[in-house]
Amino acid sequence: MDEITSLAKRRGFIFPGSEIYGGLAGFWDYGPLGVELKNNIKREWWKSMVYEREDVVGIDASIIMNPEVWKASGHLEAFTDPLVECKKCHARFRADHFSELNDLEKEEDTWVEKWRGFYNLRHSNQGLDEAKKAFQEFRLKGKVACPNCLQISEYTEPKSFNLLTEVYLGTTQPKQKAYLRGEITQGVFVNFQNIINSTRVKIPFGVAQIGKAFRNEITPGNFTFRSREFEQMELEYFIKPDEKEAWKVFEFWKNERLNWYINLGIKRENLRFRDHSLQEKAHYARFATDIEYNSFFGWKEFEGIHHRGDWDLGRHRLTYKDPDTKEEYVPWVIETSGGVDRSLLFFLLDSYSKDGQRTILKLNSKLSPYKLAVFPLLANKEKLVEEARKIYQELKTKFNTFWDERGNIGKRYFYQDEIGTPWCVTIDFKTLDDDTVTVRNRDTTKQERVSVGMLEKYFGEKLK
Ligand code: GAP
């Protein structure tokens, strides 16, 4: 994680939020490369969920809604995490994460790794063996250590902690209390009738949305993985209330979403489905499956597929009238709910690789912030620079293209590899003779000569 956070900051992907004032836990800013990567992820999602389908339309609802929405949706009552406090150091943890961290039977290796991480912070140069020994001692004592103070401690009983973030509106006292949305989803349900009335959609159909959500997480952490402000990309797919149909649609979307990640380059072996147990299911879900990523901090959720049944429309007292049969019913909803920030983090982790001195982000070219970089071989040869600028200006109108004339060509390649640029175009002395340039491939480092007039077609084909 250190390597990734350092790269993310050094190269302008992700910065700690309000860093010059010491930051704020759970908030992150996306830099010049981060915003490109994020936009590319969102664009690919929108393309596959809306543009490539006939049965899905999009919306963009507001972040703050009438508080009655959250009462009806059950979030005011049930959108909670269990909180426990260490009686020695008073650090607070999510009880479910805390017990996972201390689950002595299940994931010994993960636990040892985590323990070693905490231990190393306080006692440098301690290796895995020491951590294992200490872990065994803990196990024998049958007690659990506080992840913060590392002492065998006692904890308060778990308390329910609501994750909705409160905001206060208006100028007169008392101000009106409202909430930043904890999931973007409710904006779709409250507009259900508007969408039906204003479009030609008929059940089955879906509504897609991308937008910010906010959760007052007890323990934000693992870089952007658990933030307090993040973006979601969601589809609410409305169907007739029918169990067989629901499972068919559920399976369909599970596979669609898994394949979306695979097609954008996440390695298949790093992905899996995991069904939720009865205890962990959200209050609105009849059934839930996560798509998980095999990160170095364990298998972690980056998208949830939920069978929400008639929970939401039922609670908002909304029904659907079939325009053909005139039958009226409360539709069921199958939801796919992914995190933009988590996807971005996992795309970074999965594409991060080393080849000797080279650090390479092997991002799918559709996601890469820059598609191309253009260089003159030598910055002090006027004719080369002039020709290179001409080619750069031309390509820039078609693809997001980087210009670089600093340092030597090797250093420029290294820089582009590190930010995931798939192709570098070098203008050299041969260009002045025969109008061809060198195109170098990030992943193979192979180079080929391409004529200047063919460049747009060449890259256009590659990016298809
Ligand atoms: N509408 C359903 C819903 O919100 P969820 O499983 O709570 O379901 C969906 O969240 C996705 O949102 C998660 O899979 C994750 O990618 C993202 N997400 C949730 N909480 C997050 C957080 N604190 N930080 C970053 N992403 C988060």
Image (spheres, rainbow, N blue to C red):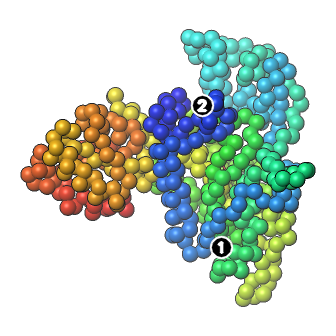
- From this view, report whether residue 65 is shown above or below residue 23: below
Near mark 2 (Cα within 10 A), the count class, few <14, some 14-19 or many ≥20, is few
* Residue of label 1: 205
Front label number (1 vs 2): 2
Please, is residue 320 above or below residue 383 in the view?
A: below
Who comes first in sequence, dot 1 or dot 2? 2
Identified at 59% across, 50% down, the residue is 340
Along the horizontal axis of the image, is 229 left or right of 96? left
- The structure residue drawn at horizontal position 43% and vertical position 48%, both measured from the top left corner, is 369
Q: Which mark, by number, is residue 30?
A: none
Q: Residues within 10 Å of mark 1 (few under 14, many from 20)?
A: some
Instruction: Give the x, y percent position of residue 302.
Output: 61, 47
Is residue 222 at all visible to an observer of this figure? no
Answer with left or right where residue 114 lies relative to residue 162. left
Residue 186 position (above or below residue 105): below
Give the position of the C terminus as an image quadrant: bottom left
Residue 173: % across, % down: 90, 50
Q: Secondary structure at mark 2?
A: helix
Which residue is rendered at x = 24% and y = 36% of the image? 409
Determine whether the beta carbon of the residue marked 2 sits less than 8 angstroms from the nearest atom of ligand 1: no
Q: Position of residue 51 (x, y in %)?
A: 52, 69
The CA distance from mark 1 to mark 2 is 47 Å
Mark 2 highlights which residue?
Answer: 20
